[in-house]
Image (spheres, helix red, strand yellow):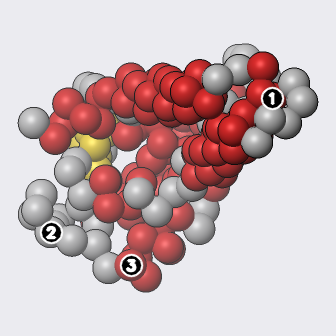
Amino acid sequence: MLPRTATIEECDVHKLLSNPRRREALDYLYHSTDAVALRELSEVIATAETGASPAPRNVRESVYVSLHQNHLPKLHELGVVDYDRDRKLVTVLDPVREVTRHMELTTPYGVTWTDYYRWVGVLGLCGVVGSLTDLPAVSALDPLVWASGALAVLAGSTAYQLWRGRSAVRRLF
């Protein structure tokens, strides 16, 4: 296994992320604060794959076996997780940040955060410019209100993202 401070080659990151089951596992593990039991992880992934809660037994078993025999050993080998095969426990390691930063982060509505922030900025700017040029309806609000509103949305969204990823932030310290 790689030391906790080792870096992962970019081609290995892309290989890891090429499988949807591994991406789902990494996302769940990244947001976990403690070790996760293989059974819990397999149930979460099976539910995500089928949309049924609980997922059908055959799907849960398939996910369990593929995680145990294939995906978790691969993640363990690259030093992204510590997988105790005997106790069936998975603990995320620091290099997971290198992998997850390559994952496209999306809002709960399926829009990437990059696109979301871009649109908030563009709409805020349009509101300010429209207000300054006396555009009907838009000029009813002062440009400072448009700018403050956009900044408040950006700040609130950033706080939400930090809160959602708080377990990952805690691992930094």
Q: Position of residue 118 (x, y in %)?
A: 62, 50
Instruction: Pick whichever of labels 1 and 2 is earlier in the sequence.
Output: 2
Instruction: Pick whichever of labels 3 and 1 is earlier in the sequence.
Output: 3
Q: Secondary structure at mark 1?
A: helix
Left or right of residue 30, residue 51 in this image? right
Q: Quadrant of the N terminus?
A: bottom left
Find disc 2 in the rendering and name its residue: 6
Residue at 76%, 42% (x, y): give it: 133
Residue at 80%, 29% (x, y): give it: 138
Nearest the camera: 111 or 84? 111
For marks 1 and 2, give the one nearer the viewer: 1
Nearest the camera: 55 or 116? 116
Residue at 53%, 64% (x, y): give it: 17
Q: Are marks 1 and 2 in contact (CB under 8 Å)?
A: no
* Callout 3 crowding tier (Cα within 10 Å): few <14, some 14–19, many ≥20: few
- Residue 149, above or below 59: above
Q: Which mark is residue 138?
A: 1
Q: Amino acid at mark 3?
A: Glu
Q: Amino acid at mark 1?
A: Val
Q: Amino acid at mark 2?
A: Ala
Measured in 3D between alpha carbons, the distance from the residue under mark 3 to the one under mark 1, in whole angstroms, is: 47 Å
Residue at 19%, 36% (x, y): give it: 171
* Callout 1 crowding tier (Cα within 10 Å): few <14, some 14–19, many ≥20: some
Residue 34: quarter of image: top left
Q: Position of residue 50 (x, y in %)?
A: 78, 34
- Residue 43, above or below 97: above
Nearest the camera: 166 or 49? 166
Q: Quadrant of the C terminus?
A: top left
Find disc 3 in the rendering and name its residue: 10
* Callout 2 crowding tier (Cα within 10 Å): few <14, some 14–19, many ≥20: few
Q: Are marks 3 and 1 in contact (CB under 8 Å)?
A: no
Q: Secondary structure at mark 3?
A: helix
